[in-house]
Image (cartoon, rainbow, N blue to C red):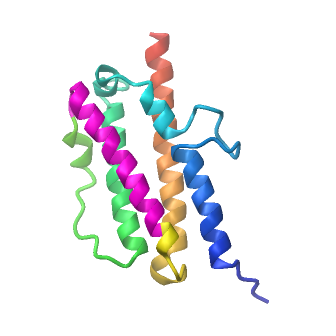
């Protein structure tokens, strides 16, 4: 027999986990100060521009990629057309960033998160448009990039 989860409960729990991933420590899975925004607050434009290892993507590139991925999946969650996405191009889009450009990129990331929260809060039917799956993928994918950024920062500090 099926035992559905109340949609409001699912959305509330999802919002708390997203909040920890991006901004506010709840103790679910990150240490204090390890959210994405807190992590990026420590990063200078120079550090954000540096290739992580052997010519690979920079921290700025990881942030740009995370923004695009959230935008695409959030559109999917709401049944909006996604269009063609060049997933390879995103890794080449962001090169060296100035302090101003780094600030703009970080603000865009926060705005994208805020937009995602509004979408989650506004979804009335989580059965439509594969919203549950898309929200889980956003969590997993963004957490993966947070891990990559934090590992890069550890390497930069050790060097």
Residue at x 25% of width, y 47% of height: 90
Q: Is residue 66 visible?
A: no
Instruction: Place residue 63 in its image quadrant.
Output: top left
Q: Main secondary structure of the magenta part?
A: helix
Counting the numbered discs, the total is 0
The answer to if 104 sits in the magenta stretch is: yes
Asked whether 84 or 103 is in front, the reply is 103
Q: Of 156 and 99, which appears nearest the observer?
A: 99
Residue drawn at the location 37% of the way across and 26% of the way down: 52
Dividing the image into 4 quarters, which one contains the C terminus?
A: top left
In the rendered image, residue 18, in percent from the top left (x then y), is placed at 55, 53
Question: What segment is highlighted magenta in the picture?
Answer: 95-119
User: Whole-percent x and y of residue 111?
Assistant: 36, 51
Q: Is any atom of residue 75 visible in this view?
A: yes
Q: Residue at x 36, y 46 (%)?
A: 109
**Quadrant of the image for the N terminus?**
bottom right
Spot the residue most to the right: 1
Q: Is residue 94 left or right of residue 139?
A: left
């Amino acid at each position: 027999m099926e035992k559905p989860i109340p949609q409001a409960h699912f959305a509330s729990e999802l919002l708390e986990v997203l909040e920890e991933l991006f901004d506010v420590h709840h103790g679910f899975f990150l240490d204090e100060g390890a959210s994405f925004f807190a992590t990026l607050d420590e990063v200078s434009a120079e550090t954000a521009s540096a290739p992580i290892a052997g010519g690979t993507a920079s921290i700025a590139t990881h942030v740009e990629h995370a923004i695009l991925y959230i935008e695409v999946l959030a559109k999917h969650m709401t049944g909006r057309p996604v269009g063609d996405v060049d997933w390879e191009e995103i890794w080449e889009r962001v090169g060296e960033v100035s302090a101003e450009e780094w600030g703009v990129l970080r603000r865009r990331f926060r705005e994208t998160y805020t937009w995602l929260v509004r979408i989650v809060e506004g979804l009335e039917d989580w059965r439509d448009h594969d919203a549950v799956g898309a929200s889980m993928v956003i969590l997993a994918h963004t957490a993966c990039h947070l891990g990559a950024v934090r590992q890069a920062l550890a390497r930069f500090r050790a060097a």
